Amino acid sequence: MAAALARHQADPHALVQLLRELQALWGWLPREALAWLATALGLTLARVEGVAGFYRFFHTRPVGAYRVLFSDNVTDRLLGSEALMADLCRRLGVAPGEVDGDGLVSVDRTSCTGLCDQGPALLINHHQVITRLDADRVVEMADLIRARTPVAQWPAAWFEVQHNIRRADVLLADSSAPGEALAAALALGPEALLEEIKLSKLRGRGGAGFGTGLKWALCRKATGAEHVVVCNADEGEPGTFKDRVLLARHADAVFEGMTIAALAIGARRGLVYLRGEYRFLLELLHAVLDRRRAAGLLGGAILGESGFEFDIGIHVGAGAYVCGEESSLIESLEGKRGTPRIRPPFPVESGYLGQPTIVNNVETFCAVNPIARRGGGWWAAIGTPQSTGTKIHSVSGDCARPGLYEYPFGTRIGRILEDCGARDTQAVQVGGPSGVCLSAFEFGRRIAFEDVPTAGAFMVFDRSRDMFEVARGFAHFFAHESCGFCTPCRVGTALVVKRLDKLAAGQGSRHDIDVLVELDKLMHTATHCGLGATACNPLRDTIVKFRPAYERHLKSLHFEPGFDLDAELSIARHMTGRDDAGAHLENLS
C-alpha cells in the first residue's frame, strides 16, 4: 500500500482511488486500515470513514472471499435473474445480502451493470463480469466457489463481453487512424476549432443536451491556473451500455476527442471517470493511453506542436449512480462523497479543484473527431435543425436483437423497434428510468431533443409485462441510489417505494395512487439535484398511460364502474402537459 501512496503522492484528493486499492489488498476496509490511511493523508478518520460509507462497492465489514453481485436492472429480472440468484444462494447456503458462516461468500444485488444486451449478468469481486447467466452456469459457479477455485481459473467463456453493434453510422463505423482528427484540429487552431464545434450545433450526449461549443467557449474564457477536461464515463443509467462499447472498441476516439477539447480550451490535464462496473476495461484503456503517448498523441509537444501538452489519467468509481451528475462526479474526483454541488458556480468556472473544467460524456468526445475532420457544417446537415448528428441507442428488453443502434436524430421510435425485432410492444422506456415511458400510440414520435430526448437507453416491454412492476422496480432503484443529502429525495423516494409495495401486496387503494401523484409534484420541484427531480418520471408516465396496471393491484378490482374519466384526464394533462395525453385514457374507458 505504501507503493500506492507514493504513486498518488499521498494526495488526499486521491482518497477514493486509495480506498479502492486498499480494499483490493484486504478484501474489505477494516477500521484500523482506514485509520492508517487517514494518518498517511493528513485527514480525519471521520472524513475517511464518511467517504468509505458513501460508495456501495466499499465495505467496512467482511463480505467474503467471493463477492457475487447480480445485476438488478429490470431487463435482467425479465430474463430470470431473481430465480438464478435464489438458486445460487440455496446451493451456497447463504441468504441474500449476508456472508456465509465460513466467511467464504456473499451474494447480493447491484444496480445495472451496463450489460443489458447480454444478461442476466453479474459482478465478481467488483472487477470481473459474467454475462449470459443460465441455470447450468449457476450450478457450476456454486461448485467452483465451494472448491475455492480462483476466479481467474473459471471458464473463460463466462467472461466474454460482446459488442453487439447492430447498426453503425458515423461514430460506430469510424475507421479513421489515431491522430487524424487531432491533426485536423491543430491545422484549424483553437479559435477556428471552437467555431466549427459551434457551427455543428453538437449537443451533449449525456441527456441534458447542453451546447458543446458554448460550454467549451465559456471554459476557455474562464480565469484559472489551469483548465481541465473531464470525460464522464459513469453511464449508470439503467439500460445504457453504449459507452461500454465505445470505450472497448473506440478508446482512441474518446481520448482523441478529449485531446481536441484540451486544445480548444487550453487544458493540460484530462481525467476519465470510469464507472466501477467497468473496472474490467481499465487495463485495456491504460494500454491505449500508453500507445498514444508513445505515438506523440499525448504528453509534451503533441504531434510536434511546441507548447501543446496534455495527458489523461483514469479515476475508477466505486458504485454511485449520483456520480453521473457532473458536480457529484467532480466531488468524487476530489476524493469526497459524491454529493451534488449547489450551482452556480458551474464547472466551466469552478470545477475540479476549483479550476475551469468541462465535463462531457464518452459519446460527445467521440463526436468531436468527425467534426474536426469534416467540419461543423457537415455534422449540422445530419439529423434535425435542433438535434444535429447521430445518436447511439442501447437497445434491450423484449426484442430479438438487443445491442447498439446508431441513427440520425429524427428517427422514429417505430423504426428502432422494427430494426431490433420487437414484437407486440406495449411500451418503451427511452433514456432510462429518468427518461420517458412511451406507449404504443406514441411510437410515431421521433428521437430528438425537441421531441423524445434520450441519454441512450431504449428498453422494450411487450404486452406480457406488468408496467406497474416495471415502475416499481425503478422506484426501488432511485430509493437505493439517493445520496441522502436532501430530505425531499431521501424521504420522498422511500415513501414512493412504500406506497408501491403496498399496492403490490394488494393492500392499496385509489388514495395511494393520489398520494403518489402528490409525491411526484413535490419531488419534481423541491429536490437538490436531478436524481430526485426525475425519480418519479416512470411513475408519472405509467400512471397516465398504463393506469389499468395500477388498478389491478387495488384491494377492490372494480375498474369499470369506478373509473372517473374526467379525473383521469385532469391528472393526465397536469402530469404530462400534453393535451393529447388523455387520448389513450379515453380508449381505456
Image (tube, rainbow, N blue to C red):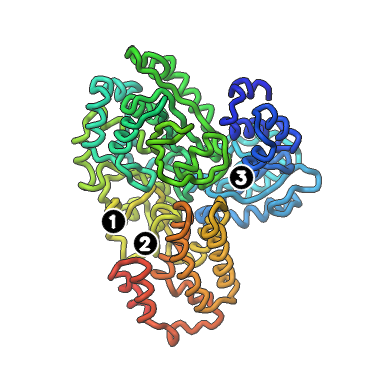
The correct choice, above or below, for 75 with respect to 212 in the image is below
Amino acid at dot 2 = Leu
As drawn, the label of residue 438 is: 2
- Pick whichever, 246 or 341, lies toward us: 341
How packed mark 3 is, by other alpha carbons closer than 10 Å (few <14, some 14-19, many 20 or more), is some
**Percent x, y of residue 208:** 36, 48
**Percent x, y of residue 76:** 53, 53
The correct choice, above or below, for 521 with respect to 290 in the image is below
Left or right? Give the position of 511 relative to 104: left
Q: Name the residue under label 3.
A: 54
Residue at horizontal 39%, vertical 40%? 165
Left or right? Give the position of 578 relative to 484: left
The correct choice, above or below, for 68 with respect to 491 in the image is above
Q: State which tag comes first along the sequence, 2 or 3.
A: 3
Q: Quadrant of residue 575?
A: bottom left
- Pick whichever, 164 or 228, lies toward us: 228
Task: Identify the element where label 3 is drawn.
Answer: loop
Residue at horizontal 35%, vertical 43%? 205
Marks 2 and 3: which is nearer the front?
3
Amino acid at dot 1 = Asp
Residue at horizontal 56%, vertical 46%? 121
Image quadrant where one finds the N terminus:
top right
The residue furthest right is 102
**Residue 67 in sight here:** yes
Residue at horizontal 35%, vertical 76%? 569
As drawn, the label of residue 451 is: 1
